[in-house]
Amino acid sequence: MKRKATAAVAAALPATVKKRRCAVYTRKSTEEGLDQAFNSLDAQRDACEAFITSQRAEGWVLVPDHYDDGGVSGGTLERPALQRLLRDIQAGLVDIVVTYKIDRLSRSLLHFARLVEVFDAHEVTFVSVTQSFNTTTSMGRLTLNILLSFAQFEREVIGERVRDKFAASRARGLWMGGPVPLGYTVRDRKLVVEDEEAARVRRVFEGFAATGSATRLALALRQEGVRTKTGRPFDKGTVYRLLHNRVYVGEVTHKGQVFPGEHEPIVSQALWDRVHALLQESPRARANQNRRQSPALLRGLIFGPDGRAMSPTHTRRRGRLYRYYASQAVLKGTADDGPVRRLPAGEIETAVLDQVRALLRQPEVVVGTWQAARAEAPELTEAETREALERLDPLWEELFPAEQARIVRLLVERVEIGPTGADVRLRMAGLASLVRDLGGVRGEAQRAA
């Protein structure tokens, strides 16, 4: 129907006049007022259509298709109607592009240069109703560049004003939109504390202050069913992002600067300071510090070649603490010509833990653990057992000493030291208990639900 209407208008033209198909392009940066019966796009189109009608004697014919971009910035070329117009130009359906003002097509010199290249390649002329020039002449191009320079300058000034207003609002502590943090809701464009979510935020801060471990805290939060604002379970990254959000101490930030906010804080300044004193240390440094304060992991578990238990002992040299596991003969001061008299505690503990981690990945250990765990958890699968054991490996460095010692005693039945190394015996019942504690995939999903 559209092509027939265009053909009918063209038929009314004198035979000597070449038909020039004109496409009207309109744009408005915001959606404000677009729902009105007669809006800015309609006003632009009426002016363009009237101009095309005035040029009817020159063979100008209106293309009935509408190319309207409402609520789209002129700073980008990715506009639905504009892209459709370019496709029609490349298909040879348009001879002249008509706009109300040049900045309706683009406010960027670079973008407009790209559009002009497309226009020239397909012998299309650009016309602005309120700014008369012809892009096919050098003077028209000069005029176009001058107008575009002012259009781009105007866009940049508007951007600077918006940024300055945003910065001034942040300096006054105002909420300027964006994702609403956990613990708050928005009322009258202000952040208001939401009690149930605020309790979750305090749980995270207090939990980290008590444990100093984001990994361990995230695991505890998942087991307790604590969720984020979007309903997802906490992980280590989510914990760290929440702990660094100054909104919770009643402040707002903008480009590295901190300002007092108009909203109420959820955590006290004292709790915030305690948490961030811990965060200044790296996770590995916190784990090492805890490990230095740790009890002997292998107390009561390590035995020498003579079958007798080796006991933890220590000595200090130049202010440094050195820990050992020593044979009973050494501790009692009796003569002992055995092959193992004293072992550095750190080295033997690390060697035993490395063996335990390696054993946890062995298929026969996984199967044995699964079979032992099924006595109390018949729904547990072998895959869930394997995943639970694999979760222990990355979690270990973040555990506190008491928790590490508990797990070692749960997993290890006996460590026998011989001339060639250490032999570690695992407790299958302990492994099964650990799998249930870690919670397989199915158990964790049930808790989260």
Image (tube, rainbow, N blue to C red):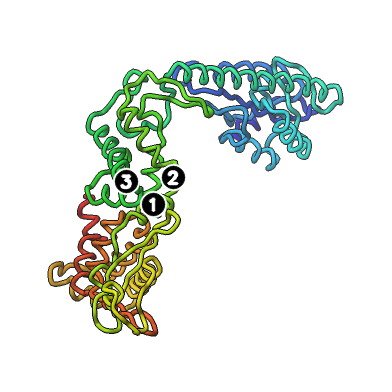
Q: Which mark is residue 289?
A: 1
- Asked if residue 232 is positioned above or below residue 387 in the image, the reply reads above
Residue at the location (42% across, 56% down)?
320
Q: Which residue is mark 2?
A: 281
Element carrying mark 3: loop
Q: Which residue is mark 3?
A: 232
Residue at the location (45% across, 56% down)?
318
Element carrying mark 2: loop
Kindly check if marks 1 and 3 are in contact, taking CB atoms under 8 A apart as contact. no
Which residue is situated farthest in the left direction here? Answer: 376
Which circle, 2 or 1, is nearer the viewer? Answer: 1
- Please give the count of numbered marks on the rendered protein: 3
Mark 3 crowdedness (10 Å alpha carbons): few <14, some 14-19, many ≥20: few
Q: Earlier in the sequence, mark 3 or mark 2?
A: 3
Mark 1 crowdedness (10 Å alpha carbons): few <14, some 14-19, many ≥20: few
Q: Amino acid at mark 2?
A: Glu
Marks 3/2: CA–CA distance: 28 Å
**Residue 432 or 232: which is nearer the viewer?**
432
**Residue 256 or 298: which is nearer the viewer?**
298
Residue 269 coordinates in the image, percent (x, y) = 34, 27
- Asked if residue 294 is positioned above or below residue 137 in the image, the reply reads below
Residue 151 coordinates in the image, percent (x, y) = 69, 20
Residue at the location (58% across, 31% down)?
65
Q: Amino acid at mark 1?
A: Gln
Marks 1/3: CA–CA distance: 32 Å
Among the 4 quarters of the image, the one containing residue 109: top right
Q: Is residue 404 visible in this depiction of the protein?
A: yes
